[in-house]
C-alpha cells in the first residue's frame, strides 16, 4: 500500500424546488461526479403549508419550507452524500444551517450574484454561500481545481428542473 493520502472524490449535489399549482412545492436533488455524470437522484412529494403555518412563519416560510423541510428530506434520502450542494434558489441556502455540507447559490438566468465576500468563482459561475457560513467559500476554493475550468454549474440544475417537470406530468396525469 502506498503512503499517499487517499482523498474522497468530489461529489456535487444539485438541488431545486418547483411549485405545483394547488399542491405545494416539490424538490429534487441530483448527485453527480465532478464531471456532471449522474450518480443518484431523489425527489419529494408535494409539500403544502397550511394557512396557520403561513401566518406563523410569515416571511420565514419559504426558507423553512424549501431549505429546512424539503432540503433536509432530500439530503437524508440520498445514499451518496455530496461535497457541495448547488442551487439557483436563495431560499435553499437555509439548508446550510442544518447540515455540515456547504450549500451555494449559483448565478443563472434567474439569479444575479455579484462577486464579493462569501462568494467563489468556478469557471463562469459565481457561487454565493450562506452569510453565516462564509468560510465555506474558502474551504471549497481548495477543491475547485478538481472541477474543469469550463464547468457549467447551472446546466445540471436545468436537468433537475426538467426531471421534476417530468415527474409532475407523470404523477399528476393519473
Image (tube, helix red, strand yellow):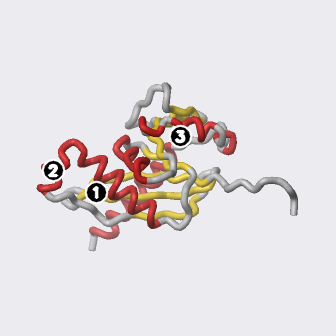
**Are discs 1 and 2 less than 8 Å apart at CB?**
no
The residue identified by callout 1 is 25
Q: Please state if 147 lies on the left or on the right of 163 as rendered.
A: right
Of badges 1 and 3, the one in the foreground is 3
Which one is nearer the viewer's eye here, 13 or 72?
72
| Pointer 1 or 3: first along the chain | 1
Label 2 Cα crowd, 10 Å radius (few <14 / some 14-19 / many 20+): few
Residue at image point 36% right, 64% down: 44
Whole-percent x and y of residue 143? 65, 42
Question: Which type of secondary structure does the marked residue at label 1 adopt?
Answer: strand
The residue identified by callout 2 is 56
**Are discs 3 and 2 less than 8 Å apart at CB?**
no
Which one is nearer the viewer's eye here, 21 or 85?
85
Residue at image point 75% right, 56% down: 6
What's the distance in space between the residues labelled 1 and 3, CA to CA? 28 Å
Question: Which type of secondary structure does the marked residue at label 2 adopt?
Answer: helix
* Residue 90 versus residue 5 in the image, above or below: above
Which one is nearer the viewer's eye here, 94 or 49?
94
* Residue 166 versus residue 141 in the image, above or below: below
Residue 89 appears in which quarter of the rendering?
top left
Residue at image point 43% right, 48% down: 96
Which one is nearer the viewer's eye here, 172 or 96?
96
Question: Which type of secondary structure does the marked residue at label 3 adopt?
Answer: helix
Residue at image point 27% right, 74% down: 174
Label 3 Cα crowd, 10 Å radius (few <14 / some 14-19 / many 20+): many
What's the distance in space between the residues labelled 3 and 2, CA to CA? 31 Å
Label 1 Cα crowd, 10 Å radius (few <14 / some 14-19 / many 20+): many
Whole-percent x and y of residue 84? 54, 49
For the N terminus, the image quarter is: bottom right
Q: Residue 136: which disc?
A: 3
Amino acid at each position: 500500500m502506498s503512503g499517499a493520502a487517499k482523498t474522497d472524490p468530489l461529489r456535487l449535489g444539485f438541488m431545486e424546488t418547483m411549485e405545483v399549482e394547488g399542491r405545494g412545492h416539490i424538490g429534487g436533488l441530483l448527485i453527480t461526479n465532478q464531471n456532471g455524470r449522474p450518480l443518484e437522484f431523489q425527489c419529494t412529494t408535494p409539500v403544502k403549508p397550511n394557512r396557520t403555518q403561513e401566518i406563523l412563519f410569515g416571511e420565514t416560510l419559504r426558507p423553512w419550507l424549501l431549505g429546512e423541510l424539503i432540503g433536509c428530506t432530500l439530503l437524508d434520502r440520498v445514499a451518496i452524500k455530496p461535497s457541495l450542494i448547488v442551487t439557483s434558489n436563495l431560499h435553499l441556502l437555509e439548508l446550510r444551517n442544518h447540515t455540515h455540507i456547504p450549500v451555494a447559490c449559483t448565478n443563472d438566468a434567474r439569479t444575479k450574484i455579484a462577486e464579493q465576500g462569501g462568494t467563489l468563482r468556478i469557471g463562469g459561475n459565481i457561487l454565493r454561500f450562506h452569510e453565516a457560513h462564509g468560510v465555506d467559500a474558502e474551504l471549497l476554493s481548495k477543491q475547485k481545481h478538481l472541477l474543469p475550468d469550463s464547468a457549467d454549474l447551472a446546466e445540471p440544475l436545468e436537468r433537475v428542473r426538467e426531471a421534476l417537470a417530468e415527474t409532475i406530468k407523470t404523477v399528476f396525469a393519473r
